[in-house]
Amino acid sequence: MSEKNIYYVNENLNFAAPISAETLFSDYAAIWLTENRTELSPKTYTRYQTLLERINLGIGHIPIGKLTSHHIIEFYSRLRLNGVNKRTGGSLSPKTVLHHHRLISSILHNAVRERILEFNPASSKYMKVPYVPAREVSCLQIKDIEKLIMVLKREQPKWRALIYILIFTGVRRGEALGIEWHDIDFDRKTITVRRSSICISGKIITKEPKTSGSHRSFSFLSDELLGQELLSYKEYYNLKIGKEAEGKRLFVQKDGRPMHPDSLNDFLKKLCLKNNLPHITPHMLRHTHVSMLIALGVPIKEISLKAGHSQLSTTCNTYAHFIELKNIKPLPTVQELLGIF
């Protein structure tokens, strides 16, 4: 094949489905989703499919060129009706309504970029974006961390090691479950985050961490509790599961397969009920770690890097309450916490 034939583009392209302002929103959304599948994470792609099921019931029958801000606003009002949320029987949360809006806006923005539409009716220029009330993140108090560490002494080394990683590094649940033995350098006392383990449609898959800044390393040189628990768990793993090797996950099921992410939430729920602890989630442990870094006076830019946030503003906005509190009075430090044990 000649070089000309390889690169030659016919002037009269034959599209399988001609797109115009008369294309139904549901049809255009399906094309958009297919074209962007490789750029979306499996979890995001599945989430968009679910959102579009509801969106298409509302506005999918309307041609994109005839879709107005009023149509979109009316659709959002219906999302807020009681009974829409199949799990609770109530309305959808403001955050979920915003997720619908962002997807609709992204699809219509693409139509503007392709010069099918002159403007995006879901843009904030033409309508009020669904409001999500600011909510302070929840984290554990020092006394709760003390009690959690105490009760964990009676649990299996796997659970202790996993929860210690969450408390003392602040990684996300999926990132912790994606750690493999070769990610831990016991000589340099570091843990490196390289992947995330998530569940989609009942299947556990491995993907890249959440953001471009999520590839990062943590030192547990000063976190003696974490270092001790990792060594203890390594001995337990070698005895019960088999000698660790490159490509093997730290946290696995009895048959050696990667652990299901929800197993951690189930364990924490049972642990809290059994020991009269406040409700604890994996993400709450992440927030707890960041709040302790703020209490220590660690620079916000460094905290943002440790948290794996792609933008500094994410850290500042999420943890504004703790930053303000730090400016008012000194908070208990990690060293004070570790000194108790």
Image (tube, rainbow, N blue to C red):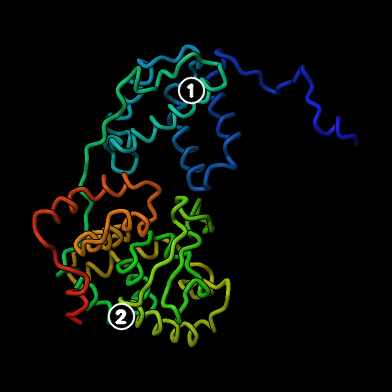
- For this orientation, the residue located farthest to the right is 1
Mark 1: which amino acid?
Gly
In front of the other: 302 or 52: 302
Q: Quadrant of residue 116?
A: top right
**Which disc, if any, is residue 210?**
none
Q: Earlier in the sequence, mark 1 or mark 2?
A: 1
Mark 2: which amino acid?
Glu
Q: Is residue 38 above or below residue 78?
A: below
Give residue 2's position: percent from left, percent from top. 90, 34
Classify 10 Å Cα crowding around label 1: few (below 14), some (14-19), many (20 and above): some
Q: Is residue 248 left or right of residue 136?
A: right
Q: Quadrant of residue 76?
A: top left
At 15% from the left edge and 50% from the top edge, which residue is drawn? 324
Classify 10 Å Cα crowding around label 2: few (below 14), some (14-19), many (20 and above): few
Q: Look at the image and tell me whether residue 279 can be seen.
A: no
Q: Nearer the viewer, mark 1 or mark 2?
A: 2
Q: Quadrant of the N terminus?
A: top right
Q: Quadrant of residue 295?
A: bottom left
Can you identify the residue that label 1 sits on? 60
At 48% from the left edge and 16% from the top edge, which residue is drawn? 62
At 50% from the left edge and 71% from the top edge, which residue is drawn? 183
Q: Is residue 265 left or right of residue 138?
A: right
Q: Is residue 55 above or below residue 199?
A: above
Secondary element at image label 1: loop
- Marks 1 and 2, Cα distance to the nearest angstrom? 56 Å
**Which disc, if any, is residue 224?**
2
Q: Is residue 242 above or below residue 283?
A: below
Give residue 278's position: percent from left, percent from top. 18, 63
Q: Look at the image and tell me whether residue 159 can be seen.
A: yes
